[in-house]
Amino acid sequence: MKEDSIIISKATIDRLPLYFRTLRLLQREDVEIISSEELGRRLGITPEQIRKDLASFGQFGKKGVGYYVKELLRNIGDILGLHCNWNFAIIGVGHLGWALANYRHFSSLGFNLAAIFDVDPTKIGLHINGVQVFHLDDMEKIVQEKNIHIGIIAVPEAHAQEVADKLVVSGIRGIWNFAPRKIRVPGSIYVIDEDLSVGLSSLSYYLARKVPPKQQI
Amino acid sequence: MKEDSIIISKATIDRLPLYFRTLRLLQREDVEIISSEELGRRLGITPEQIRKDLASFGQFGKKGVGYYVKELLRNIGDILGLHCNWNFAIIGVGHLGWALANYRHFSSLGFNLAAIFDVDPTKIGLHINGVQVFHLDDMEKIVQEKNIHIGIIAVPEAHAQEVADKLVVSGIRGIWNFAPRKIRVPGSIYVIDEDLSVGLSSLSYYLARKVPPKQQI
DNA sequence: TAGATTGTTAATCGATTAACAATC
DNA sequence: TAGATTGTTAATCGATTAACAATC
């Protein structure tokens, strides 16, 4: 393993989940061995790119043969830390929070929704997808009790910073921010921004300009 | 304007919506002039980066002064094609499709939800956020009638390709794909992939590794 | 062995950062 | 005018692509 000595690029990290999901599909199709060529064809990524990405974490393939699906799946899962069985919380039971609470792929990846937070008294105490909704004021207690590491911000943008502050105080380590606003957190906290307007706006750009489409990720 | 001669990088395009949303905030705060320095501070982007991004589309600032918020807002909006008032459709009334149908930021950016599609007979004919749910079989007719340019795929992954095929046949030009699967479309169609598992998985990677967080976009 | 495919090094390409002249 | 800030060119940095030796 080389991950201690070499810094892996964000671009590589973001491709790992794509490899992972495709390998799972292959496993379900009972494919045992896959070449970088074929994996690339399925994802629209060049085989060289895939080999380079994987090689930065170790030697997972067999020369002249390819990659064993099961083995590679386990290795990428480990690299992504999916074996950690992270507990996460969703803050905000609007339409988006509701949808995320019911998103099935998270649990299939090993993420466990442990709590939901809101301030609306009519929502506190409800169970969504089997998970209880708590009041925002109880966050610190619940986060400690349930050992929650990740917070998903799904509140209106006006309250995003305030929620982020509470998450940090509660001891959360990573934030996935769906509010279309930059949040400020201490340097030790990881933040992934997921502003849904960006996708649609960039699509609009290309449609308006008639720029010829290129292969996307 | 230079956009005809020079190819703008995807990274630049993806930052434009961030500038746009921040400028709107500034406008609401009655700020009339902003420097690249201050805009960068708000977004965690270097001022040089911002000046470079904007300069690839024209000269929008005043040297020694900064950028006029109102003017820059209009210019970026035009670049992003937001004045086109795109009609879009959502396919799939699951939790995610429901949430997207109710997402307020789309309409505030000038995107108009014109139709929703599903196959579930109990959902056909319903109105969500004032927009009617049609059967998938009527897609071609409705897309033509309502002049829909963009399709948002929010169906289970197993049906994503089939829906993409239907969208293409119906004459759609751009697809925003939330299904965690690569879809195949003709080269003239734009596809933006938005696999929600990627965000959470990459967060997991950083948490598991204790890699020191760096400034995100 | 011959054919196939990885892992790695070198070459290219593209994006970011730095520096500074232009000018409001 | 002096100070400030853009727009642009040059330098650096990083990521992708190409090539190929290693080896199953």
Image (tube, coloured by chain):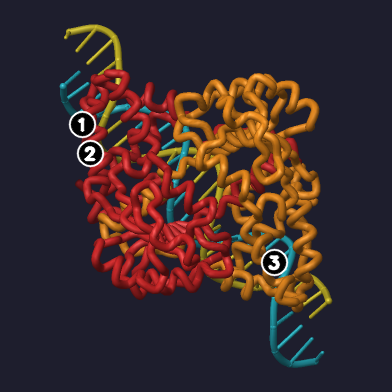
Chain colours: A orange, B red, C cyan, D yellow
Taking the spot 42% from the left edge, 69% from the top edge, the residue there is B136
Contact between marks 1 and 2 (CB within 8 A): the answer is yes
Mark 1 and mark 2: Cα distance apart in space? 6 Å
Task: Count all numbered tags in the image, as a single digit.
Answer: 3
In the image, what residue type sits under mark 3?
Answer: Leu
In the image, what residue type sits under mark 2?
Answer: Asn
Which residue is identified by label 2? B75
Q: Which labelled disc corresponds to residue A108?
A: none
Taking the spot 38% from the left edge, 40% from the top edge, the residue there is B105
Viewer can see residue B169: yes
Q: Nearer the viewer, residue B126 or B9?
A: B126
Contact between marks 3 and 2 (CB within 8 A): the answer is no
Would you identify the image quadrant in which residue A100 lies? top right
Q: Position of residue B41 (x, y in %)?
A: 44, 24
Which residue is identified by label 1? B71
Secondary element at image label 2: helix
Which residue is identified by label 3? A23
Mark 3 and mark 2: Cα distance apart in space? 44 Å
Describe residue B93's horizontal placement relative to residue B68 as left or right.
right
In the image, what residue type sits under mark 1?
Answer: Glu
Pointers 3 and 1 within a single chain: no
In the displayed structure, would residue D22 be above or below residue B35?
below
Describe residue B53's horizontal placement relative to residue A112 as left or right.
left
Q: Position of residue A180 (x, y in %)?
A: 45, 35
Viewer can see residue B214: no
Secondary element at image label 3: helix
Chain letter belonging to callout 3: A
